[in-house]
Image: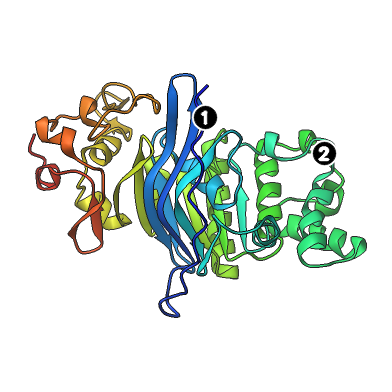
Amino acid sequence: MTNVPEPLSPMAAAPPDSPDESLLDIRGLTVAFPTRSGLAVAVNDVSLSVAAGETKGIVGESGSGKTMMCRAVLGLIPQPGAILAGEILWKGQDLVTASKRDMRRVRGSQIAMIFQDPASALDPVFTVGDQIAEPLRVHRNMSRKSAQKEAIDLLGHVGIPSARERSHSYPHELSGGMRQRAMIAIAIACRPDLILADEPTTNLDVTIQDQILGLLSDLQREFGMAIVLVSHDLGVVAQNADDVAVMYAGYAVESAPTKLLFSSTRHPYTAGLIKALPTVNIDAQRTMLSPIPGQPPALDHLGSGCPFAPRCQYSAERCLQVDMSLVRVADQHDTACPFALEVMSGDG
C-alpha cells in the first residue's frame, strides 16, 4: 500500500485582516488516502470561505469531496487519510496545526456537525437525552441535572413531541426524522457559530426533508449561526443557500452567489447538474431527466487537466492543460473552466 506523504510543516496562523474577515477560511486544502494503486486525492487544492450568518451550499455527486472537506475542518478524517497541504483558518487560527486540546475546544462548541446518517452517528447504547447532555457538560460545565433539563428543552425546541419521555429513548426507538432532529439538538446545544450540515435530509421523505430544512433555517435566524449545507441535490441548495461552491472529483470547479450561479452558469458540470434536475412534462404526465453522461473518475487515477473533460461537450486539447484553479470571470463568480463564456451562452 502506498504511504501517505508527511503533512506540511506547521505554519503560524495568519491574524485576521479586518473585523469583517470570514469565520472560516479554507485555503488550498488537499486531503488524500493511500490505496494499492496510489494516492486517492479526495479534496484537491480547495479554497472557500464562510461568513458569519451565511449559508454556504456545497454541491456535487457522491465522492466529489464534500463530506471529507467538512471532516477535515473538525479533524475527523478517517485513518489512514491525511491533510497534505493547505490551511483551515477558524477566526484566524489554523486548525490544521492546532493541538488536540484546542480542537476539542472548537469541536462541538464553536463548530458542530450534523452527519448524513443519524442512525450510525448516534451512539446506540446511550439515550438521546444523554447524548445531548454530554456536550453541555463538557463545553458549558453544566451539572448532570442541569444538562438533562437543557437536553429536554432542546428536544422540544427542535420539534420532538413529548420531549421529556423521548429524552429517555434510544436512537433505534426513534423515526428517521426524529433521529435527525436529535442530531440537530446535539449540534446546537452549545450555540456554535458554524454548523456543518452534511446531507441533513438523506433518506428522509420529501415532507420530512422540508421540515428539517425549515428547522435549520429557523434556528439559524434565532441563533445567528453560519451553515455549510452539503448536498448532492442542487435543488435543495438552490432553495436554501446564499452562496454555492460546486465540487467535482475533489476540486471546487465553480463558486458564486446562488442566484448568479443559476442565471449565469460558467462551468459545464454545473450546467449538467442543473439540466439533471427533474422537470415534469405536463402533456406526457411524466418526469423528464437529462443525466450527465459517463461516470466520475477514480480519484487514484486522475490524469492531467480537467477531470470532467471525458464527460464534457466542450472538451478540447486545451482542457488537458487546465490547472483547475478558480478564475474570477465576473463579479463574485469564479470558475475553473476555460470555456466559461460558451457555457453561459449555451453554445456547444
In the depicted view, which residue is nearer to us: 70 or 216?
A: 70
Could one spot residue 86 in this view of the protein? yes
Image height of 70 relative to 281, above or below: below
Name the disc covering residue 170, or none: 2
Amino acid tagged 1? Asn
| Residue 177 drawn at (x, y percent) | 65, 41
Q: Quadrant of residue 291?
A: top left
Q: Residue furthest right?
A: 145
Could one spot residue 241 in this view of the protein? no
Identify the residue at image location x=49%, y=61%: 11
Residue topped by disc 1:
3
| Residue 104 drawn at (x, y percent) | 70, 57
Q: Secondary structure at mark 2?
A: loop
Label 2 Cα crowd, 10 Å radius (few <14 / some 14-19 / many 20+): some
In the depicted view, which residue is nearer to us: 21 or 148?
A: 21
Q: Secondary structure at mark 1?
A: loop
